[in-house]
Image (cartoon, rainbow, N blue to C red):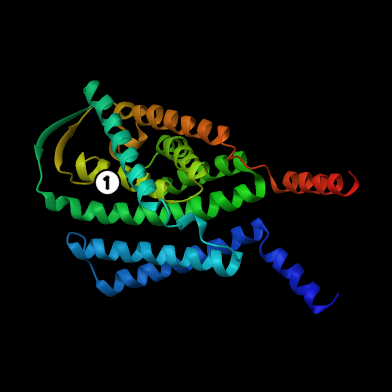
Amino acid sequence: MDDQGSAGTLRRIMRYPATLLVLSIFAAFVAGMLATLVNSAFGPHKGDVVAVLIAIIAAAIFVAVYAAFCLVVEGRPVREFALNGAVAELGAGLGIGLVLFSSVVAVIALFGGYRVIGYHDASVLIPVLGISIVSGFTEEIMLRGWFFRLTEKWLGSWAALALSAALFGALHLGNPNATLLAGAAIALEAGIMLAAIYMITRRLWAAIGLHAAWNFAQGGIYGIPVSGGAMDGILRSDIRGSDLLTGGAFGAEASLPAMVIATAFGIVLLIIAYRRGRFMAPIWRRQRAEAERDLTETFG
């Protein structure tokens, strides 16, 4: 085999979805290390504006590493962060996240599990804003931009949906106050919903907005723990009742109202994605279909 043929074979191996999936783990590690170094350089800034600046820099690092991965390793444009329509998609995601979580709180309050007993100063919004920016960008890049997208390209949409949702839920099991129910809730509601909104747009803006707004509303507005971490919000809340109603110490994400509302919304998004032809078959089925088309074109 000549050098040109060897180079082509190597390129195909390097750009096979399973190979890219392995390489993306290394890319995510590099991005995480760079973000950690930036955080260490600034020192502890949990309650001031610098914390938000650090979060923005961390998000920018992940976007830059993702863009480099697409351009250099995959050899393609960075479609997931295309700027055309980005503001509209990000805004839609932010609005959906805020409305969805507010709906969850409304149902919990209706059944006596949540009530407002006072207010905090607006300064409490600073740390949760930083957390929301970081979680929105970094988790969506890793879980939807890399893991879901590359698994879908390899195994198809259904397998990618199941595996990415399960992984997202499992990753939250290491959080404070996490339970198996909390992990399952995250997998069902967020895993399905965020993958589905990515499938519809084939970009990350809406998923990032939805994720960030959900966390910001949960901790910054309603003062409910975010994935097990206690938060002070603008509203001082009195949360009481069964863990099934309120989500307990993990937060409303682990509640029955959240599971029902967010999962139902995620299923609606999946239906929209399916009707728009956004579902992808496994790579071997796509290759077989392409080979059959070539035969048909060649022999009529």
Q: Is residue 92 left or right of residue 194?
A: left
Instruction: Tell me which residue sits at (38%, 28%) in the image.
Output: 261
Q: Can you say which quadrant of the picture contains the N terminus?
A: bottom right
Q: Quadrant of residue 250?
A: top left
Q: Which residue is mark 1?
A: 216
Tally of numbered discs: 1
Instruction: Tell me which residue sits at (72%, 64%) in the image.
Output: 12
Q: Is residue 236 left or right of residue 28?
A: left
Q: Can you say which quadrant of the picture contains the C terminus?
A: top right
Residue type at mark 1: give it: Phe
Measuring from the top left, give residue 180's x and y in whole percent: 44, 37
Looking at the image, which is closer to me, 288 or 103? 288
Is residue 228 among the parts visible in the rendering? no
Looking at the image, which is closer to me, 122 or 118? 122
Q: Is residue 158 left or right of residue 88?
A: right
Instruction: Tell me which residue sits at (37%, 42%) in the image.
Output: 178
